[in-house]
Image (cartoon, helix red, strand yellow):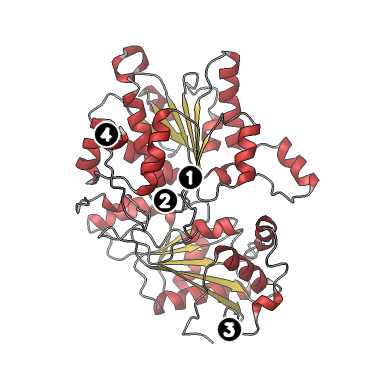
């Protein structure tokens, strides 16, 4: 079922294992099935993929909520490639040069990754896929000149080129990490904030609205919409329906009766103040400090939201202590591949420089693919600590991550789920590897209460870290 080939790490599985059905049983194109075996050594889908691939191929709108690390993104790529072939686009020459699907992703790195998968899946066919706007050195006009059938890109880059993109024949729109792409106000957001968001739509909203308006004007059937995320909540699903994006959509919740974070993942939370480091809950019973702990989940998630790190001055003593703590932990732990998450407003190069002062080699996660190639060609001997933001790493498959370090309070519960989801993924034998998530927080204010709220919502047990009090 699983063969030891080079691209095996790309394919993630549910901890419950594979489906008993094959891709052929799901009516995936025979060419795609052959390429799955040839390039990825795969012939059976995961349980999650066996549920949503038929829906995508049917052309119905799909809202997919799935735990991170289950092969969601790869499965969508398989379904999209197969759908293009099964619809017979290769038999009509006039359609061979039409853009058929738009794949909206949160970052350039994921766009390149999906392009790579699609290229291998469509090997031996006239169909193609291209990542758009991912490299400054590549002329986007040259990309469009190749007439890709699937275009993959970030919403901002795609929207910037909306007047030049051949979008009039698109019949499928895929939105990865839909919650982050739209960033709707929370249910209890102030009216002023809600009005501001309504008058300032996010690029994804403007992009999809524009495409749908073209179809209305032409009285053409609305394109299929596939929206996926590990945190696709009810307000977001209702908003899409009300906005006319979906029509009797199928909602598949793979997270039902499944933990939001992998059960193989161990969670630690350390509080840092000056030169002192302590464990979560070591000073008092946090439950006694919790505010409305059993209240509405969305209100609780709002309370978890924090200012994270003081990004205006990254030489701040407490921040310096946090970075030093990461360096110490990196030395204590047997880190195979580690990812350090920092606030979006700070410079990853500054963090790398400060870590270097403590003897830790660190690199921006956006260099991951290139450095991975260098290591394969023996140009690079050691694996660095990868520095990322919550958004730059969304959806990316980093090979065999053993440790995730989070510097500062997570922005939200869903943000923690995505960051923690970089570990606890597929191992070389098709089993979910264990991993550790260590969050380091400035010991001040009600930080511990907010962290306690978050762990309670996730039903995640916080372990005691033996090397500190």
At label 1, counting other C-alpha atoms closer than 10 Å, the crowd grade (few under 14, some 14-19, many 20 or more) is many
Relative height, residue 170 to residue 1 (above, below): above
| Front of the two marks 2 and 3 | 2
| Residue marked by disc 2 | 396
Front disc: 1 or 3? 1
Q: In the image, which is nearer the foreground, mark 2 or mark 4? A: 4
Residue at 46 percent across and 75 percent down: it is 327
Mark sitting on residue 107: 1
Q: Answer with mark 3 or mark 4, whichever residue precedes in sequence.
A: 4
Q: Secondary structure at mark 2?
A: loop
Residue 53 placement: quadrant:
top left
Whether 366 is drawn above or below 443: the answer is above
Residues marked 3 and 4 touching at CB (< 8 Å): no
Query: Toward the viewer: 135 or 176?
Result: 176
Query: Disc 4 marks which residue?
Result: 32
Q: Is residue 195 left or right of residue 451?
A: right
Along the line of sight, the residue nearer the viewer: 331 or 139: 331
Residue at numbered disc 3: 275
Rendering coords of residue 315 (x, y %): 60, 70
Label whose residue precedes the other's in the sequence (1 or 2): 1
Residue at screen point 74% across, 51% down: 188
Alpha-carbon span between mark 3 and mark 4: 56 Å
* Left or right: 89 in relation to 284: left
Depth-wise, is mark 3 or mark 4 nearer the camera? 4
Classify mark 4: helix, strand or loop.
helix
Q: Earlier in the sequence, mark 2 or mark 3?
A: 3
């Amino acid at each position: 079922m699983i063969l030891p080939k080079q691209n095996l790490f790309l394919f993630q599985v549910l901890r419950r294992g594979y489906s008993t059905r094959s891709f052929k049983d799901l009516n995936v194109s025979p060419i795609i099935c052959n390429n799955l075996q040839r390039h990825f050594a795969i012939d059976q889908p995961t349980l999650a993929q066996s549920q949503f691939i038929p829906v995508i191929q049917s052309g119905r709108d799909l809202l997919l909520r799935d735990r991170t690390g289950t092969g969601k993104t790869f499965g969508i790529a398989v379904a999209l490639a197969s759908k293009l072939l099964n619809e017979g686009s290769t038999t009509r020459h006039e359609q061979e040069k039409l853009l058929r699907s738009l794949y909206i992703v949160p970052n350039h790195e994921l766009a390149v990754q999906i392009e790579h998968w699609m290229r291998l899946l469509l090997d031996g066919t006239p169909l193609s896929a291209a990542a758009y706007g991912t490299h400054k050195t590549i002329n986007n006009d040259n990309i469009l000149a190749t007439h890709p059938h699937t275009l993959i890109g970030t919403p901002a880059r795609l929207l910037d080129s909306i007047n030049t993109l051949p979008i009039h024949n698109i019949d499928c729109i895929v939105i990865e990490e839909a919650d982050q792409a739209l960033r709707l106000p929370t249910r209890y957001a102030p009216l002023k904030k809600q009005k501001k968001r309504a008058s300032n739509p996010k690029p994804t909203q403007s992009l999809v609205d524009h495409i749908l308006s073209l179809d209305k004007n032409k009285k053409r059937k609305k394109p299929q919409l596939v929206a996926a995320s590990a945190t696709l909540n009810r307000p977001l699903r209702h908003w899409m329906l009300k906005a006319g994006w979906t029509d009797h959509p199928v909602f598949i919740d793979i997270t039902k009766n499944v933990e939001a974070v992998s059960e193989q993942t161990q969670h630690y939370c350390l509080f840092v103040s000056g030169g002192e480091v302590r464990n979560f809950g070591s000073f008092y019973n946090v439950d006694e400090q919790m505010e409305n702990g059993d209240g509405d989940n969305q209100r609780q998630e709002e309370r978890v939201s924090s200012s994270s790190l003081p990004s205006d001055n990254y030489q701040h003593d407490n921040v310096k202590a946090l970075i030093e703590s990461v360096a110490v932990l990196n030395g204590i732990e047997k880190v195979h591949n580690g990812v350090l998450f920092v606030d979006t407003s700070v410079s990853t190069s500054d963090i790398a420089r400060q870590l270097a002062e403590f003897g830790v080699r660190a690199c921006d996660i956006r260099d991951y693919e290139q450095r991975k190639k260098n290591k394969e060609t023996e140009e690079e001997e050691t694996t660095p600590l990868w520095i990322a933001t919550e958004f730059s790493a969304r959806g990316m498959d980093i090979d065999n991550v053993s440790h995730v370090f989070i510097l500062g309070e997570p922005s939200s519960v869903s943000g923690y789920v995505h960051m923690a989801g970089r570990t606890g993924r597929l191992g070389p034998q098709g089993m979910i590897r264990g991993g550790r998530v260590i969050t380091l927080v400035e010991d001040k204010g009600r930080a511990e209460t907010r962290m306690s709220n978050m762990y309670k919502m996730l039903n995640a047990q916080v372990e005691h870290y033996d090397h500190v009090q």
